[in-house]
Amino acid sequence: MSTPSEHPIVLLFTGDNGDQYGYEDRFRAVGIFLYTGEGQVGDMKFVRANRALRDHEAEGRRIFLFE
């Protein structure tokens, strides 16, 4: 995940090898993508990129997913 400070966007990156590192991203239904988020140990915390992803709509950010 990347959140460039000079642009109102959140960049998400996913791939086939993520499950090796505890990331299980996948498409569920049309228009719905489950993204694991940032961090590999314990519960996700809504800080940094996770917070930007969660709050993207309220902050006027667009999400771009790269596979």
Image (cartoon, rainbow, N blue to C red):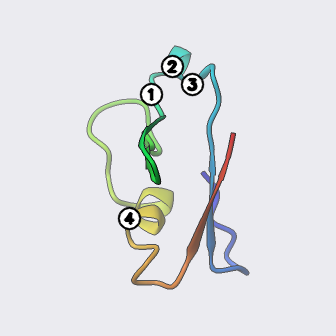
In this view, the residue in front, 8 or 28, is 28
Q: Which quadrant holds residue 42?
A: top left
Q: Which residue is mark 3?
A: 18
Q: Which quadrant holds residue 11?
A: bottom right
Mark 3 and 2 residues: CB-CB less than 8 Å, in contact? yes
Q: Which residue is mark 2?
A: 19
Mark 1 and 3 residues: CB-CB less than 8 Å, in contact? yes
Give amino acid for label 2.
Asp
Q: Which residue is mark 4?
A: 54
Q: Earlier in the sequence, mark 3 or mark 4?
A: 3
Q: CA distance from mark 1 to mark 2?
A: 5 Å
Q: CA distance from mark 4 to mark 1?
A: 18 Å
Outermost residue, left side = 43
SS at badge 1: loop
Q: CA distance from mark 3 to mark 4?
A: 21 Å
Quadrant (top left, top right, bottom left, bottom right) of the C terminus: top right
Mark 1 and 2 residues: CB-CB less than 8 Å, in contact? yes
Give amino acid for label 1.
Glu
Outermost residue, front side = 30
Up the image or down, 26 lies above or below 5; here it is above
Q: Position of residue 48 (x, y in %)?
A: 48, 62
Residue at 63% of width from left, 72% of height from top? 9
Q: Which residue is mark 1?
A: 24
Give amino acid for label 4.
Arg
Q: CA distance from mark 2 to mark 4?
A: 22 Å
- Are there few (<14), some (14-19), or many (20+) residues within 10 Å of tag 4? few
Q: Is residue 49 left or right of 28 when viewed as pictured?
A: right
SS at badge 4: helix
In this view, the residue in front, 31 or 42, is 31
Disc number placed over residue 16 in the picture, else none:
none
- Are there few (<14), some (14-19), or many (20+) residues within 10 Å of tag 2? few
Q: Earlier in the sequence, mark 2 or mark 4?
A: 2
